[in-house]
Image (tube, rainbow, N blue to C red):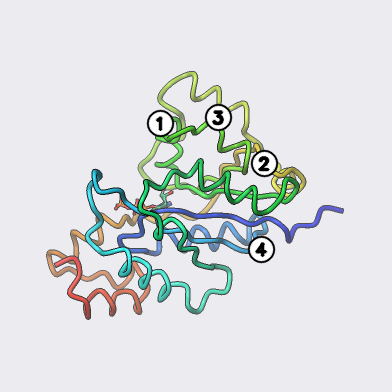
Amino acid sequence: MVDMNQLQALFGGTFDPVHYGHLKPVEALANQVGLSRVIIMPNNVPPHRPQPEASSQQRKTMLELAIADKPLFILDERELRRDTPSYSALTLKEWREEQGPQRPLAFIIGQDSLLTFPSWHHYETILDNCHLIVCRRPGYPLEMAQEEHQQWLDDHLTQHVDELHTQPAGKIYLAETPWFNISATLIRERLEHGENCDDLLPAAVLEYINAQGLYR
Ligand code: ATP
């Protein structure tokens, strides 16, 4: 019998700030595919890239507040502590080495990230170390722009959740998660204009943003 309680997933991002478009699809996903835990990993943004508006410490605190009452999630600060770029391929390789060769591991991304995925550093090695689980995001096509990337996707695609549990890595699963038309950019813009964001992110995170005077 398949043990459906072993699959762990990693969910990376800038989280500037964390919002319901991050949290709710992943919570739905955990029920749909059976995730034992989700490791949230905020990334370090190297100096030559556009900087997040919130500091690393503030992004971390917002995540802590967002997941305080959600035991599914745990926070991993390893990328924040680095002063080198956060390359998912390297982080996932390191995670695989820690977990051993057999344990099923997954990396969660949104549909927008799938579309740019082939431009990521050593993207083709990522499926050696984990599965890819993709959450839907409104406004983004379901097909890859280039034929060779669509072929890569088709080669790894599965519709069988079981395979995510019985194989350690190598599959791509497009999950039917609920759509949330929310982005951190939208929230930053709304806050800058003094607009209401109550339905877009957890109240504790919004209170912290206001107390810190962020995104004004
Ligand atoms: P920004 O607007 O600043 O670019 P973002 O809202 O896209 O930020 P990130 O921290 O860049 O947030 O995203 C982290 C991960 O969460 C990415 O894999 C992204 O695809 C996914 N994600 C973000 N928002 C959503 C959403 N509304 N629905 C599904 N996935 C999402």
Left or right for 52, reference 100: left
From the top left corner, tell me how far across and down residue 165 is, in percent. 73, 49
Q: Earlier in the sequence, mark 4 or mark 3?
A: 4
Q: Nearer the viewer, mark 3 or mark 1?
A: 1
Mark 4–mark 2 CB contact (< 8 Å): no
Q: Which residue corresponds to mark 3?
A: 153
Q: Which residue corresponds to mark 1?
A: 119
Element on which disc 4 rests: loop
Q: Earlier in the sequence, mark 2 or mark 1?
A: 1
State the CA–CA distance, disc 4 to disc 1. 30 Å
Q: Which residue corresponds to mark 4?
A: 36
Judge: label 3 CB < 8 Å from ligand 1: no
Q: Nearer the viewer, mark 4 or mark 1?
A: 1
State the CA–CA distance, disc 2 to disc 1. 20 Å
Element on which disc 2 rests: loop
Front residue of this view, candidates 77 and 106: 77
At x 33%, y 57%, the residue is 182
From the top left corner, tell me how far across and down residue 43 is, in percent. 39, 54
- Amino acid type at mark 3: Leu
For this orientation, the residue located farthest to the front is 83
From the top left corner, tell me how far across and down residue 1 is, in percent. 87, 53
